[in-house]
């Protein structure tokens, strides 16, 4: 190739890239869905931290896609500013309280949570100028308490008692908010009540569902994920069922110890709870208000063992470079099983809820794996990732 040809090719390529970038970015930035929310694959400048929540990439899991002949895709929720899918719910419950006039500048958000919702709320509250009070069971690690405190929250670890007990951390959170509201009505206080406040589900109807539909160009055949509050599964199911006229199939992925698998399998008759699980943030003993309107529309459910989940933590790391927490890995196992069930050519989407960072001292510890009888679930060729004693 001559120098002239080479330089005109370079000029053409640069122009083409520039044009491609401009013509890609402009319509995406203006694309607004029926809820008034920008849904795009690439964000421009955002006004505040809360603008960086959502619009996460959809990652093709290459090995599992090859093995199943399907497109197995994972929504990279670990890329949210607080590191998990719960940032979306945190933003929507706070926005909902603002819209209902319950929170004014300088007001206080109170929640009962031991995990990601608290972290999401802490970021959202700092960004919007609210105080945050968290109640959690005192069985949680000091690391979690410290993290929430260093993110600016006031934390109350309280004895771990059942939901029905008035001293359960959720009811203590509610009473704290009621008390503050009486003392300081001018600034307001709200118990955000993530389990039964349907603003949580709305986050996924208005953002996660539309993002998945747009990112797959409407070619998604099935969606599956586990539930904690049920907000993600219910919200995404609602949107995908509506937009596809019921064509997209939606499946619950359930860990041992949760009652929802038996509930769905028995058509709502049974609530059997068997065993427990290493997964955190998922598994449920009841049908929450977030889930109740969609539970009848779920096409089926899968019960995923801890053995399969832990193996997938290691597989995703080795095969995809994805450092995932256990709930995400359980979701990936479910996506693989749904893909196998539906057969080659289908597109199956799941949620990569958070990374392994907060769980590494357990998931990659030989002693911990042995204590849970999970050491044998790690295939020989993946044992080199068990790097902690
Ligand atoms: C790590 C993780 N995965 C999954 C979930 C479940 O999401 P949802 O509450 O929307 O059902 C949670 C909820 O806290 C979580 O922390």
Image: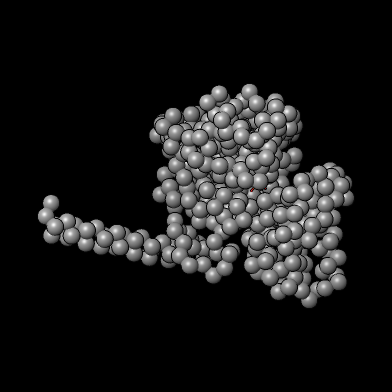
Q: Residue drawn 75% across and 54% down?
A: 146
> Would residue 187 be seen by someone viewing this image from the given angle?
yes
* Quadrant of res 251: top right
Looking at this view, is 301 or 103 the one in front? 103
**Residue drawn at (68%, 33%) of the image:** 389
Q: In the displayed structure, would residue 44 be above or below residue 281?
A: below
Quarter of the image for residue 307 reads top right
Residue at 62% across / 56% down in the picture?
82
Q: Can you give x and y, in whole percent of width and height, for residue 55 in the image? A: 50, 56
Residue 161 % position (x, y): 85, 44
Q: Between residues 247 and 388, which one lies in front from this camera angle?
A: 388
- At a point 30% along the width and 63% down the height, the residue shown is 18
Residue 37, placed above or below residue 237:
below
Q: Pick the residue in front: 201 or 276.
A: 276
Residue nearest the observer in this picture, 143 or 258: 143
Q: Relative to 166, is 361 on the left or the right?
A: left
Image side of residue 149 versus residue 40, left or right: right
Which residue reaches farthest bottom?
186
The colour scheme applied to this rendered structure is: one colour
Q: How many marks?
A: 0
Specify whether 157 is left or right of 69: right
Q: Measured from the top left, where is residue 154 in percent x and y? A: 78, 61
């Amino acid at each position: 190739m001559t120098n002239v040809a080479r330089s005109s090719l370079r000029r053409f390529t640069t122009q083409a890239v520039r044009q491609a970038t401009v013509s890609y970015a402009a319509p995406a930035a203006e694309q607004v869905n029926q809820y008034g929310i920008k849904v795009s694959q690439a964000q421009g400048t955002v006004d505040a931290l809360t603008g960086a929540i959502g619009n996460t990439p959809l990652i093709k899991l290459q090995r599992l896609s090859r093995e199943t002949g399907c497109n197995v895709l994972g929504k990279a929720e670990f890329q949210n500013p607080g590191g998990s899918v719960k940032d979306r719910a945190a933003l929507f419950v706070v926005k909902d309280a603002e819209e209902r006039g319950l929170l004014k500048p300088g007001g206080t958000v109170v929640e009962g949570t031991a995990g990601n919702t608290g972290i999401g709320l802490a970021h959202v509250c700092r960004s919007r100028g609210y105080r945050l009070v968290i109640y959690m069971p005192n069985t949680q690690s000091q690391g979690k308490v410290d993290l929430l405190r260093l993110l600016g929250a006031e934390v109350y670890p309280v004895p771990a008692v059942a939901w029905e007990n008035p001293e359960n951390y959720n009811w203590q959170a509610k009473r704290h908010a009621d008390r503050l509201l009486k003392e300081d009505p001018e600034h307001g206080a709200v118990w955000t009540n993530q389990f039964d406040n349907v603003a949580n589900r709305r986050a996924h109807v208005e953002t996660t569902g539309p993002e998945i539909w747009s990112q797959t160009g409407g070619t998604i055949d099935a969606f599956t994920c586990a539930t904690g509050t049920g907000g993600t599964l219910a919200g995404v199911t609602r949107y995908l069922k509506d937009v596809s006229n019921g064509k997209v199939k939606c499946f619950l992925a359930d860990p041992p110890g949760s009652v929802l698998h038996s509930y769905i399998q028995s058509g709502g008759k049974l609530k059997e709870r068997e065993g427990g699980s290493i997964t955190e943030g998922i598994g449920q003993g009841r049908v929450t208000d977030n889930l109740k309107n969609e539970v009848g529309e779920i096409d089926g459910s899968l019960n995923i063992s801890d053995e399969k989940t832990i193996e997938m933590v290691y597989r995703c790391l080795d095969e995809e470079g994805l450092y995932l927490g256990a709930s995400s890995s359980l979701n990936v196992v479910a996506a693989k099983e749904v893909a196998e069930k539906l057969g080659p050519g289908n597109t199956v989407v799941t949620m990569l809820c958070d990374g392994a960072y907060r769980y590494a001292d357990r998931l990659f510890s030989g002693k911990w794996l042995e204590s849970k009888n999970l050491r044998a679930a790690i295939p020989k060729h993946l044992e080199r990732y068990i790097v902690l004693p």
